[in-house]
Amino acid sequence: MFHANATGHRVQRRTRVDAVVAAIVTDDNKITSTTPATAIEVILRLVERLTSRQNAERIRHLMGFGASDSGMTKA
């Protein structure tokens, strides 16, 4: 990320980044994933955030998916 300082020069702002190796990572209100193959799990996490864990698990079960312990990571 860049910003202009008082002299007009572009300066790179340093930020702290924690790299996580996982198919899906949830961090606060951000959910990121690696491929379109993770779309269903991302949507179920969004459903959980917007409604409840019980509702997301109910939908997961109705869609024929197993438990939510699919190796995804919460940062």
Image: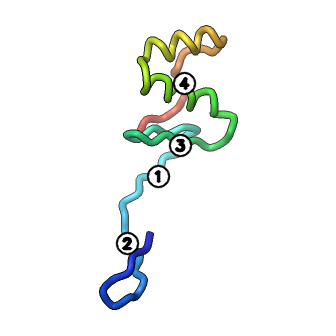
The circle drawn on residue 19 is 1
Amino acid at dot 1: Ala
Q: Quadrant of the N terminus?
A: bottom left
First in sequence: mark 1 or mark 3? Answer: 1
Of marks 4 and 2, which one's residue comes earlier in the chain?
2
Which residue corresponds to the image point at 65% horizontal and 13% vertical from the top-left? 63
Label 4 residue SS: helix
N-term-proximal mark, 2 vs 1 = 2
Q: What residue do we see at 53% from left, 9% from top?
A: 58
- Please tell me which residue is depicted at 69% across the width and 34% down the height of the picture: 37
Spatial CA distance of label 4 from label 1 is: 23 Å
**Badge 3 is on which residue?**
32
Q: Residues within 10 Å of mark 1 (few under 14, many from 20)?
A: few
Q: Amino acid at mark 4?
A: Leu
Q: Which residue is mark 4?
A: 44
Mark 2: amino acid? Arg
Dot 3: element: strand
**Distance CA(mark 4)–CA(mark 3):** 13 Å
- Identify the mark at residue 50; answer none if there is no mark: none
Q: To which residue does mark 2 refer? A: 13
Q: CA distance from mark 1 to mark 3?
A: 12 Å
* Location of residue 21 with respect to 1 vertically, above or below: above
Residue 37 against residue 62 in the figure, above or below: below
Q: Nearer the viewer, mark 1 or mark 3?
A: 3
Q: Earlier in the sequence, mark 4 or mark 1?
A: 1
- Which of marks 3 and 4 precedes in the sequence? 3
